[in-house]
Amino acid sequence: MTWTKGLNKRTDHESQIQTASEVSAMRGRWKEEFYQEFEDTINNNEANKYAKAAAWYYVTYDPTERQRRQDTNEDGYFSFPWVVDKIL
């Protein structure tokens, strides 16, 4: 993500537009990452997509995983699995 110089001079509205654009781009990049392994026809079925989406959800929200992240000082990303919300 590249921020333009002078961001502090921008209006709140301009900052909101830029932030929304960056979030949309980031979401798009992660969607591409998610679907990349399903490009071949062998692995391209709904059960495999659902399993991967469920795994993303699990590692984000499962209490055991959350505790593990806290123990190792890893950050959690609570909205991450919603990149593939249409599958979940």
Image: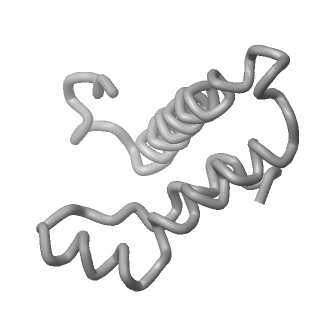
Task: Judge by depth and name the residue closer to the eye, 16 or 87.
Answer: 87
Q: Of residues 42 and 73, which is closer to you in this image? A: 42
Horizontal side, residue 15 vs residue 24: left or right: left
Quadrant where the C terminus lies? bottom right
* x 22%, y 41%: residue: 8
In the rendering, at what x and y percent does residue 30 appear? 54, 34
Please state which of residues 22 and 42 is positioned toward the viewer in this rendering.
42
Q: Position of residue 39 (x, y in %)?
A: 74, 17
For this rendering, which residue is in front, 20 or 49?
49
Give the residue drawn at x 55%, y 56%. 56
Q: Total label count?
A: 0
Q: Quadrant of the N terminus?
A: top left
Task: Answer with left or right where residue 56 lies relative to residue 67.
Answer: right
The quadrant in which residue 33 appears is top right
Compared with 17, 40 (above or below) is: above
In the drawing, does residue 40 fall left or right of residue 9? right
Q: Is residue 24 above or below residue 37?
A: below
For the view shown, which residue lies furthest in the front direction?
42
Q: Residue at x 52, y 62 (%)?
A: 79
State whether residue 77 is above or below residue 65: above
Q: How is the image coloured?
A: one colour
* Residue 34 image offset from top left, x and y in percent: 61, 34
Residue 25 found in image quarter: top right
